[in-house]
């Protein structure tokens, strides 16, 4: 047994288990550039490694002396449930591999001889899912700590009446502040995930907030009540989160341009999205909606081919809203963008086939009442066209995935200079900014406290542009998402679910109509 630990920053810890030394060496050479790789040549040796170190992924051969690979992975499922598991097998073992996947909850299997590129992609997807799970677990612990704080505050409020009379005002302020922090944390998480989705999909959607608000208005008119409205709102924001795990060649294409194999890969994204969110209890309801939102009323959708009322009502609502929004953009399933009126005509035409006819009629009524309130007022520009005075309508993210400037930042000459340095560093990459459509140098939307000066964290980020590391320079071009961002104003504020308010600077909802949505 030996370890491969290099000084360069690695993306995860991988354990390779195979009784053939040549196989271990080949896998180590294939993966050691991007990951910490540990090799074991028997199941017993692997268990020693597992007890000594935490691993993100185990790749294990099916046939080994003593304990088989399937048995070892079943043991790992019990003892190390958060670790991703991939089984390596020969063609003669495919039936056993399929059975092991079903019984042992194994992520994927790879057949010998493997394709190096396919195996790298499979490992990268597994590590990415593991990373997201770690982030969700960390967030969950943070929320639990805050809930403990709230419980402690509530216990303190159980004072005697005499003490309560003098302290109730202060205690109420503390409880409200804790609740507000909890909601702000949720908004921050949603904002981060929406930015991740829009960055990963290259801005193909760019209307997550519009879809979320339309879904909420639709739900209220379609007899959806209580927490289901909040779940539907979140599901509309995060409906494409499963796509962050899909290969680049699938993400960048319209479904009309995909091969049969790519369409099968694409059909995995609702289930992947559900898996990413299910581990965080407040998002479990939204996760279930996301899994079913690509089902069709006639049973020809995916991933479960549900039909009619077997599809949960919130998922049927989200399918209608998502298609209405997506049909107005170039990368839609029809292959060309539609005007809002044409998108409505398509919904009516397909009512009873793709969509629930009753819900389509309700949605058309909702659009007549509210759709004009979601008109976009943002512009997507190449960094080369950035000018001092412009106001960011979304975060400025580097090709390495680092948030360098936050939403609402007023660009200065210093920012522009640093952006040009970033272009030189990532030569050949397309980098975009998203600004409010107010004209260069305008002060009309300058928010209080946003003088154009950087706060400490932003100053550190922008000054670090020249030192992000050579690995980032080899990454593929990452485009900032085209999400529509404005302040949120909702006449039904009292009906909001308690855990989450509108996502600030992402939810678009002006008080007065400002034209038709695009």
Image (cartoon, helix red, strand yellow):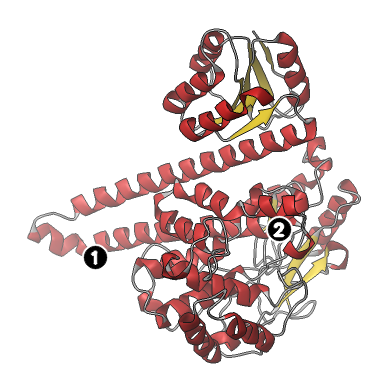
Residue pictured at 53% horizontal, 70% vertical: 298
Q: Which mark is residue 502?
A: none
Residue with the most extreme left position = 161
Quadrant in the rendering for residue 333? bottom right
Mark 1 lies on a secondary structure that is helix
Looking at the image, is mark 2 or mark 1 earlier in the sequence?
A: 1
Vertical relation: 6 (above or below) 451: above
Q: x, y (%) of residue 466? A: 82, 44
Residue pictured at 82% horizontal, 54% vertical: 418
Residue pictured at 42% horizontal, 65% vertical: 310
Residue 147 shown left or right of residue 364 in the figure: left
Judge the density around disc 2: few (<14), some (14-19), many (≥20) Cα neighbours within 10 Å: many
Judge the density around disc 1: few (<14), some (14-19), many (≥20) Cα neighbours within 10 Å: few
Front in this rendered view, residue 115 or 448: 115
Residue 206 seen from this side: yes
Instruction: Say which residue label 1 marks.
Output: 169
Front in this rendered view, residue 465 or 78: 78
Front in this rendered view, residue 37 or 419: 37
Mark 2 lies on a secondary structure that is loop
Label 2 with label 1: CB-CB less than 8 Å:
no
Q: x, y (%) of residue 363? A: 51, 83
Quadrant in the rendering for residue 320? bottom right
Q: Residue 201 carries which label?
A: 2
Q: x, y (%) of residue 255? A: 73, 62
How far is the residue under mark 2 from the one under mark 1?
48 Å
Residue 30 shown left or right of residue 36 in the figure: right
Vertical relation: 54 (above or below) 463: above
């Amino acid at each position: 047994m030996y370890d491969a630990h290099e000084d360069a920053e690695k993306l995860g810890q991988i354990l390779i288990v195979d009784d053939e030394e040549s196989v271990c060496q080949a896998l180590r050479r294939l993966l050691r550039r991007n990951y910490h790789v540990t090799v074991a040549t028997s199941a017993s040796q692997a268990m020693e490694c597992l007890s000594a170190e935490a691993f993100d992924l185990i790749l294990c051969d099916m046939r080994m002396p003593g304990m088989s690979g399937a048995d070892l992975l079943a043991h790992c499922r019990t003892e190390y449930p958060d670790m991703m598991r991939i089984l390596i097998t020969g063609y003669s073992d495919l039936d056993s591999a399929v059975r092991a996947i079903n019984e042992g909850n194994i992520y994927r299997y790879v057949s010998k001889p493997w394709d190096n590129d396919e195996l790298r992609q499979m490992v990268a997807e597994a590590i990415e899912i593991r990373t997201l799970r770690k982030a969700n677990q960390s967030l969950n612990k943070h929320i639990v700590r805050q809930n403990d704080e709230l419980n402690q505050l509530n216990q303190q409020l159980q004072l005697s009446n005499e003490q309560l009379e003098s302290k109730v005002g202060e205690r109420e302020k503390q409880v409200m502040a804790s609740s507000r922090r909890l909601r702000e944390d949720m908004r921050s998480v949603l904002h981060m995930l929406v930015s991740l989705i829009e960055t990963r999909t290259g801005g193909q959607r760019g209307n997550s907030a519009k879809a979320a608000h339309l879904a909420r208005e639709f739900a209220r008119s379609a007899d959806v009540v209580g927490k289901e409205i909040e779940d539907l709102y979140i599901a509309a924001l995060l409906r494409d989160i499963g796509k962050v795990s899909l290969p680049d060649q699938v993400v960048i294409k319209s479904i009309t341009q995909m091969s049969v194999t790519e369409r099968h890969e694409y059909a995995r994204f609702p289930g992947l999205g559900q898996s990413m969110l299910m581990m965080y209890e407040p998002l479990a309801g939204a996760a279930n909606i996301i899994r079913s939102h690509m089902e069709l009323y006639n049973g020809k959708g995916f991933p479960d081919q549900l039909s009619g009322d077997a599809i949960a009502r919130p998922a049927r609502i989200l399918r209608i809203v998502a298609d209405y929004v997506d049909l107005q953009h170039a990368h839609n399933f029809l292959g060309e963008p539609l005007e809002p009126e044409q998108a409505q005509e398509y919904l009516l035409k397909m009512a009873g086939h793709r969509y629930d006819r009753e819900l389509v009629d309700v949605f058309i009524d909702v659009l007549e009442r509210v759709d004009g309130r979601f008109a976009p007022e943002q512009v997507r520009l190449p960094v080369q066209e950035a000018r001092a005075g412009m106001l960011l309508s979304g975060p400025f993210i580097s090709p390495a995935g680092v948030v360098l400037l936050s939403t609402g930042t007023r660009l200065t000459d210093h920012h522009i200079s640093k952006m040009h340095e970033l272009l030189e560093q990532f030569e050949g990459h397309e980098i975009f900014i998203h600004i409010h459509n107010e004209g260069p140098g305008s002060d009309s939307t300058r928010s209080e406290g946003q003088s154009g000066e950087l706060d400490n964290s932003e100053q550190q980020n922008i000054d670090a542009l020249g030192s992000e590391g050579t690995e980032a320079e080899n990454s593929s071009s990452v485009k900032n998402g085209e999400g529509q961002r404005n302040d949120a104003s909702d006449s039904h504020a009292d009906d909001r679910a308690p855990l989450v308010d509108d996502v600030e600077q992402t939810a678009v909802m002006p008080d007065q109509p400002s034209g038709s949505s695009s």
